[in-house]
Image (cartoon, rainbow, N blue to C red):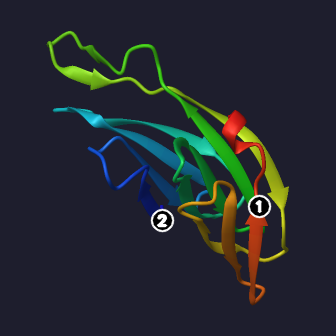
Amino acid sequence: NGVCGVEFDRNDIEMNKLVLTTLESRYRLYDMRTHHPVQGYSFLSQEAHQSTVWAARHLPQNRDVFMTCGGNGSLELWRYSYPAQRSIKDKDGHAKGVLGTVTQLQKKKFSTQPIASFDWHADKEGLAVMGVLDQTVRVLLCTKLNLV
């Protein structure tokens, strides 16, 4: 179905993870390090928000933590954990990516309207801003992110 947003985990390093958000109440997280010639990049598909997932933004201070924005007016905070081994060889000898796991850390509803945009502050860990389709801009503070 439709893609609403895409974001690499960081733009200052080699391609690593890519999050793609969709109209289908899901996001896909791709491992961009290993490309299989037949199956392509490995990915996991995760249900979120029970509505359109408008965007995903990685925390600048920790690229394994990211926030998703829901069409139901909620934000969901996620953490990615790497697998013990990032790639394996298939029966033909081609490298194939291995995905880790995603854990939901927090979920909070802020509005009855979709949260269409979100951004973290580059220097202040946990400080963020979001744009909601109820014609508001809201400032948000997530605490204890240093413990994740």
Which amino acid is tagged 1?
Leu
Relative placement, left or right, of 85 versus 29 is: left
Q: Which label belongs to residue 131?
A: none
Q: Residue at x 53, y 53 (%)?
A: 58
Residue at the image point whose x is 67% and y is 72% from the top = 129
Q: Is residue 119 above or below residue 76?
A: below
In the rendered image, the residue lying farthest to the front is 123
Q: Quadrant of residue 41?
A: top left
Mark 1 crowdedness (10 Å alpha carbons): few <14, some 14-19, many ≥20: few
Answer with left or right where residue 145 lies relative to residue 44.
Answer: right
In the rendering, at what x and y percent does residue 93 appear?
14, 13
Q: Give SS at disc 2.
A: strand
- Which secondary structure, mark 1? strand
Q: Position of residue 35 (x, y in %)?
A: 22, 34
- Compared with 102, 67 (above or below) is below
Q: Residue at x 56, y 52 (%)?
A: 59
Percent coordinates x, y for residue 100 in the rendering = 50, 26
